[in-house]
Amino acid sequence: MSSVRLEGIAKRFGSTEVIRGVDLDIASGEFVVFVGASGSGKSTLLRMIAGLEQPSEGRVFIGESDVTDAPPSERGVSMVFQSYALYPHMTVYENIAFGLKLKKAGKADIAEAVTRVATMLEIEALLDRKPGQLSGGQRQRVAIARAIVREPDVFLFDEPLSNLDAALRTRTRIEIKDLHRKLKATMIYVTHDQVEAMSLADRMVILNGGHIEQVGPPAVLYHEPATKYVAAFLGSPTMNFLSPTVVGDAGGADSIGIRPEDIHVAESGLSGTIEEVEELGETRILHVKLENGDNIAVRDRSLADPRIGQAVSVSFDKASVHRFNANGMRI
Amino acid sequence: MKGKTALKTGGLIALWIVVALFLLFPFYYAVVSSLRDGSAIFEASLWPANPTFANYEAVMTEQPFARNILNSLIVAFSVVVLSLGLATFASYAFGRARFKGRRLLLYTILGVSMFPQVAVLSGLFEIVRMFGLYNNLLSLIFSYMIFTLPFTVWVLTSFMRDLPVEIEEAAIMDGASSWTIVTKVFLPLLAPALVTTGLLAFIAAWNEFLFALSFTLTNEQRTVPVAIALITGASQYELPWGNIMAASVIVTVPLIVLVLFFQKKLVAGLTAGAVKG
């Protein structure tokens, strides 16, 4: 395992700037997740660490060595692709062994390594099959096995779960986390799914328009978002943004934000009418239109039978209010 | 409803029979004629009264026809192997690499195939003479690539372009060189396209007449189409139809065998190419 360091990374495709000035330190053995909307540059950043893309500016370090100009195979990294990218004409065994064969490893060594990884991922029974005969989840495991077998210092995952169905995605997520604990390897993982990101990450990197909005543990990002963008990006339903006059003294804030779970139906407070009700089982989301015209989401199931058009009052704890200035920075 | 479907099916079957007759009758008549001896060949019946293999014997003994077949096989196989080899690597560059003048080069290659054979014949003849290849099979192998390379390059390029980029990237991450990627990863995936284009190149080279006639002189260097055209009878005024028919049947059989053998892959390659444009 190795640390990864990015220094002043920029990437331009023609005249479009995809990544602008990214600095990042990833500790050895850390699980870091790059998350952002599509077009935020998260995949490009990952591909530059892999060596599939050359940065226009800046340096990439893996461990102590500068690998900016090194080819992918000499960086000690391996990658799991979104489409799995298995070799369709090779059996599972040959798929996993391909990299080792190119490294001119001995036949016995290859067989031993493949068997070991296959056992770890519970795909021993599939070794003679072709990728076309496997289910999506099984292909995913083969792709991970192929990445593991080379014993890289750094694992790169490019949205590896986005082709799986929801149930399988949740299960595989836990397995990847488990794998990280077993291998103690550095892992960098790209996703646009914030739940996936929060559940996996030691630290999350939130990207927006090619620059880093905030880096930190999921809980910190959720509870103390540094910018309005981060505040809005994390959480579902998204944070409510209200005009600061609602709280009276806003401390010079341009806008304030309150998470839906921090607002409750109350005897008194801000009054409004229920516009929509989402019943989610363990909770209920009320969409309320306030008297001043602001729309807010309230996560509350205390009302026995909420009806659309019903008048309600909502209140919140002042301590749960996030304040942002005109530039979208946290105050 | 049922009657209508039956009528439709019946109509379709009738249509296919007509098409099949149209396509196969000439070949059938060649087979029948080749089995007739002497003046029986001028009978207009659909079945030979006394089938005999005398024509086949004659065609093999009266001239070096076996040698001609061997020549054709050498030329056609060489053309297929060289075209596919060159086209595979060319298509990797055209389909995968970005470089200046890529489109221009691709259209130039297409442009080459637009010249009629007669237009390039005299110039090509000079080149063949210059290299000292006149009356040599190498001249045919060389000149046939003029018409096989453009379409092999184009078809393979469109296939190559449609192979998923991530597979190539996975191979790069595994430490594969460009050579390994083409030979170990892409080539097996291109198999249907290779079979289709290879077969078309084989047929084109096997049937070619004009270059073969112009660049060879002696009977020992001729390929089959020329040899058949130059079969002569006992006198200037006699055309040995029996021998010609026998020879025609002999040279058609390898093509039919090849197509039947690769039938499945051939259809896969043709339709895939059609969908991908």
Image (tube, rainbow, N blue to C red):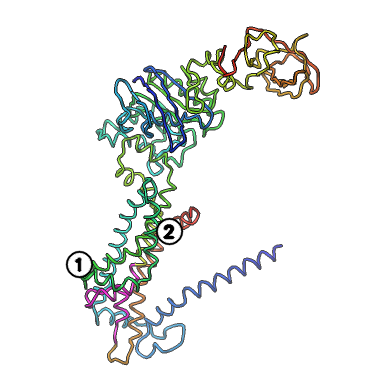
The stretch in magenta equals: B205-232
In this view, the residue in front, B271 or A142, is B271
Which corner quadrant of the image does residue B208 belong to? Answer: bottom left
Q: Which mark is residue B152?
A: none
Q: Quadrant of the N terminus of chain B?
A: bottom right
**Residue at which label 1 appears:** B131
Which amino acid does the dot numbered 1 rest on? Answer: Phe
Q: Residues within 10 Å of mark 1 (few under 14, many from 20)?
A: few
Which residue in the structure is indicated by mark 2? B266
Tell whether position B212 is magenta. Answer: yes
Q: Looking at the picture, which amino acid does disc 2 mark?
A: Leu
Q: Position of residue B34 (x, y in %)?
A: 37, 81
Q: Chain of mark 1?
A: B
Give residue A106's quadrant in the image: top left
Residue A331 position, x and y percent, is: 57, 11
Q: Mark 2: few, some, or many residues within 10 Å (few <14, many ≥20)?
A: many
Helix, strand or loop status at disc 2: helix
